[in-house]
Image (cartoon, grey):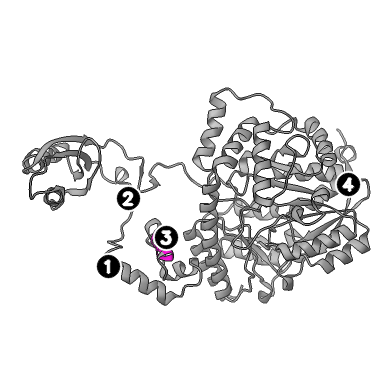
Amino acid sequence: MTPERQKVLLHLLEHNAKLSPQTVTAMLEDEDLETVERTIRELEDTGIIRGYSAIVNWDRVESDRITAIIEVKVTPQRGVGFDEVARRIYRFPEVQAVQLLSGSYDLQVVVVGRRIQEVARFVSERLATIDFIQSTTTHFILKTYKVDGVVLEDGDDDQRLVITP
Amino acid sequence: MTDWPSRLLPLARDLPPSGIRRFFDLAATMEDVISLGVGEPDFVTPWHIREAGLYALERGMTAYTANAGLPVLRQGIARYLEGRFNLRYQVKGELLVSVGGSEAIDLALRVLTRPGDRVLIPEPSYVAYTPLVRLAGGEPVHVPLRADAGFRLAPSDLERAAGASGARLMIWCNPNNPTGAVVDRQQLTALAEVVLRHDLVVISDEIYAEIVYGGDYCSLAQMSGMRERTVLVGGFSKAFAMTGWRLGYAAGPEAVIRTMLKVHQYAMLCAPVMAQVAAVEAIERGWQDVAEMVEEYGRRRRFIVHALRDMGLDCSDPGGAFYAFPDIRTTGLTSAQFAEDLLVRAKVAVVPGSVFGPSGEGFVRCSYAAAINQLERAMTRLRDFLKAGG
């Protein structure tokens, strides 16, 4: 499969991982099922596809779940780059995401907990105490409107009539 | 008590109701129907275009515009037609912004049909042509499109129909609704020769021109000698997913467009200003959105054609629009029976081909302007329906 076609395949699966290999094959031009299945396997084996998940609107499921975005400033030292600090952070299971950013702070950490206190304790006891971490700023998420390109609010239903010419 | 039937224009009173109506009424009462019967994009108008419309309201743009449409919009349309088809139209006199392509079609038919004129309508085709020709005082003459020719208008068929009817006008759509067939440059050249030989004028409804899959799409107006005898109808509905905004246009020879403009200014005055402002945004900055939507339609098209063939239904490759037009004659049902049974028993709505003209009998129109998971479910239901004996 050409790299261009692989990119289309990845976009299709990123948008809807539940598409069957049969459907994906039909949607791509001039590909056979075997090639598509093999390509997906290779993408999984080489770690380009790291997993499949559902986009869940947790706001509608449980009330005792809280997500915080934490800005972390790091003082890099000889022998300890951002990567090493990031690794120390992402190993905590409550950490959902860690990204290195350009701009006024260095690492953005997403943490999920059951209560504000739980997240606060994580920040003060676990995160802030890591060497080379200069400061942290914690933002609690109040409401999620859109995530991964998907709007979580209702009201975007199909407005069309059932049959039109 | 007023005797209404005697007060109504017989032509309008006796128009048959749209063949789609009955299915619509039936489908509207049912739960859990997957509709492949919708003749419009499932995408919502791209946000930056909607936002331009909102901004127009915020700025207080609530007044009439020039009858022919905002000059800046006409300029945008003229630039598009020149860039896309190498067709040059004067912004003043040769372009008219209408309330949807539909109004442009109605205006063109009204000013080009003299009482009793015969008007050629290749069919199956869009449901409005025949009634609008009648309302304009003309006599519709159907030119059958043949399935074995991929529903593309054969020059010999046009030749025969033009010769036999003495018609002076033809209205057609390319790409075609309901078949998705696209007539390419080579075939257009041959058709243009027939048109010239019979001194026909053509209303060319090219509302789906931007929804084509590969190939080199040409306008009929590009063919040698055709620009001066073609009223080209286009619009924003399909390409930019703007059906509800009601915005289209006509481009053509000054004598026709100016006459259409007179009718338009008395009947409509102008197209809605908010929609016109949004259309400026669309035609200037909306092309990436169009490309992405067409790419998505293309993938669904491959899926649905593959699925239909896989369950034993013959289906030619639609070159444009967002319709597949499978042959259901093997089921032994008429297309109306098939569509009704499929709706009642399998809860999938399609449109019987016969609604679009007698030559559509034996086929159904399946719109793939629907999310892929909807299409998947619809195809599963259709397969089960066929297995159970149709």
Is the same chain shared between marks 4 and 3? no
Q: CA distance from mark 2 to mark 4?
A: 59 Å
Q: Which badge, 3 or 1, is on the more N-terminal residue?
A: 3
Q: CA distance from mark 2 to mark 3?
A: 19 Å
The residue tagged with tag 4: helix, strand or loop? loop
Residue that carries the numbered disc 2 in the rendered image: A56
Is the same chain shared between marks 2 and 3? yes
In depth, the one of B363 and B146 nearer the eye is B146
Q: CA distance from mark 4 to mark 1?
A: 67 Å
Q: Position of residue B372 (x, y in %)?
A: 49, 60
Residue that carries the numbered disc 4 in the rendered image: B113
Residue that carries the numbered disc 1 in the rendered image: A46
Q: CA distance from mark 3 to mark 1?
A: 18 Å
Magenta-colored span: A4-11
Q: Is residue A105 visible?
A: yes
Give me the residue at 27% from left, 69% from top: A45
Is the same chain shared between marks 2 and 4? no
Of helix, strand and loop, which mostly describes the magenta segment?
A: helix
Q: Where is the N terminus of chain B found, in terms of image quarters?
A: top right
Q: Nearer the observer, disc 3 or disc 1?
A: 1
Residue that carries the numbered disc 3 in the rendered image: A12
Q: CA distance from mark 1 to mark 2?
A: 27 Å
